Amino acid sequence: MHLAADFVVAFVALLHAWFLVLEMFLWTKPLGRKVFQLTPEFAATSKKLAMNQGLYNGFLVAGLVWGLASGDFHVKIFFLACVFVAGVFGAWSLGNRKVFFVQAFPALMALILLHLH
């Protein structure tokens, strides 16, 4: 169970590393605009906000990697809880359930597996 939990934690970290790349570097590029369904104009005007959001995702990745590298249960729980809350808030504030399933649900699964272990 421990290995499964750490695998899901690593998956959540990789997801957020991908979000970092999308938001910080690909926001105005065709792939970034397609993923987030952005017009070129909106992508250009919101680029700095997206870069800031991407940086926050980087902090989540750093925390999850720290938890994995140290094996510290509490560090993993804290950063997974942050990811979960961000996913729930994002889904609610955007009115988009997809955000819940892409962001919050994997974190919730990791939290459950960590508590079962």
Image: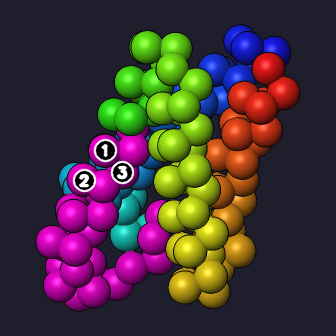
Q: Looking at the image, do the residues carrying marks 3 and 1 touch, with CB atoms under 8 Å apart?
A: yes
> Residue at the location (24% across, 53% down)?
55
> Residue at the location (56% across, 74% down)?
89
> How far is disc 2 from disc 3 in space, using C-alphas?
5 Å
Query: Callout 2 environment at 10 Å: few (<14), some (14 to 19), or many (20+)?
Result: some
Magenta residues, start to end: 35-61
In percent of width and height, residue 58 lies at: 31, 44
In percent of width and height, residue 10 lies at: 55, 26
> Residue at the location (50% across, 54% down)?
82
> How far is disc 3 from disc 1 in space, using C-alphas?
4 Å
Marker disc for residue 58: 1
Assign a secondary structure to mark 2.
Answer: helix
> How far is disc 2 from disc 1 in space, using C-alphas?
5 Å
Residue at label 2? 55
> Residue at the location (73% across, 14% down)?
2
Q: Amino acid at mark 2?
A: Leu
Relative to 60, 40 lies left or right:
left
Q: Looking at the image, do the residues carrying marks 2 and 3 touch, with CB atoms under 8 Å apart?
A: yes
Marker disc for residue 102: none
Q: Give the main secondary structure of the magenta stretch.
A: helix
Residue at label 3? 57
